[in-house]
Image (tube, rainbow, N blue to C red):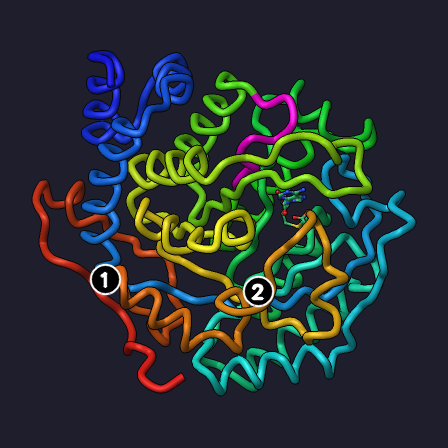
Amino acid sequence: MDQTTRQLIDRLDADRSLPLEGYEYLVSHYSPMAAKRLEQLAVVRRKAVYGNSVFIRGLIEVSSFCRNDCYYCGLRRSNEACERYRLSDDEIFDRVGAGYAIGFRTFVLQGGEDMRFSRDRVASIVSSIKERHPDCAVTLSLGERDRDTYAAWRDAGADRYLLRHEAADLAYYETLHPSNMSGETRLACLQDLRDVGYATGAGFMVGAPGQTSAHVAADLKFIEEFKPEMCGLGPFIPHHSTRYAHDAAGTVEQTCFLLSIVRLILPTVLLPATTALGSIDPRGRERGILAGANVVMPNLSPSDVREKYAIYDNKAHTGVESAEGLEDLNSRMGEIGYRIVVDRGDPATEDPINDAGETKGAIVAGDPVAAV
Ligand code: SAH
């Protein structure tokens, strides 16, 4: 690791911020040594806020229909080979009930932009879930909608919303999307989500086609400034029926490196070790947690639709990637010194190191999962 990289890492840890060129330098000077240093510092921050707790979210993929045509995504509208499905309300409630029984206290309803999931229908699904399980959080990830719709879902009880910004460099955003989509709209949606009161999640793919260090630096600056409560960072993985079928996937190393950087920028952020990370490496989940992540989102969709929600090739949905594999996931987290908790896993509002100038000790919420 060169002297400049070392100084930038120390500065990032102290200030939670770097100038744009600092981020670009750091990202373009990846080395195993730099990654190790970032990881050590990120884990200190993560443990000060969240101890060794790992939050779990039950991911329910409600629809593979999508009105959009994002060039990288297997669910894109123009992919005629994609098998389309949408869950009924009862199927969703059934999966929520099954997830509750095994210890999930946050449910994420994710899908393509399927207008059959109308404003009223989603509001009614959310309020039914909250009525049945008032101790649970509901996260939505249903793409770009208007502010009134976001507000209606929030009023119905939804707590959080995941909408990756995908690319903060607007010209680069355009290369990944058709001309009817824009980075400005995406960012405006994120602002609407925040304004109507959601804990808001941004994020981007690591190693996406044509992505440069300067693009990633812009993403990190955006994350620093917007301060999302959640941040989804996973490797890009090609899908065979997209124009990027033969592009290289992002790497575990680069993803973990960026997870550590994001943890240093936002010590309290909810940071998942994503399914994509688990899909390119059998120990991807663990490696993400060890780099500073604190959330995992096992698949709680009905098993017959999991294959169909194919945003990229070889998406993991069994074993520790599945809700049924929770016991296994728990023991694998145990092996690396972490533990899954039965808890809504809300974002911490306090960062003991920076807020007090010294570590106050871990704020550890939730009961460990004893017998899942
Ligand atoms: N329609 C919703 C949910 C999209 S799927 C929305 O627009 O937010 C969730 C995320 O999967 C996307 O935000 C994108 O960053 C990621 N994704 C899509 N295609 C991918 C691919 N080929 N490789 C890795 N991640 C991908």
Are there few (<14), some (14-19), or many (20+) residues within 10 Å of tag 1? few
Front one among 65 and 314: 314
- Is 289 part of what is drawn in magenta? no
Query: Splitting the image into 4 quarters, where does residue 155 fall?
Result: bottom right
**329 with respect to 155 (left or right):** left
What span is in magenta?
Answer: 203-211
Residue 150 percent across, percent down from the top left: 65, 55
Front one among 305 and 132: 305
- Tell me the residue that label 2 is attached to: 108
Q: Secondary structure at mark 1?
A: loop
- Tell me the residue that label 1 is attached to: 337
Q: What type is the residue that disc 2 sits on? A: Val
The image quadrant where one finds the N terminus is: top left
Q: Secondary structure at mark 2?
A: strand
Residue 204 percent across, percent down from the top left: 55, 37
Q: Residue at x 57, y 37 (%)?
A: 205
Residue 318 percent across, percent down from the top left: 58, 68
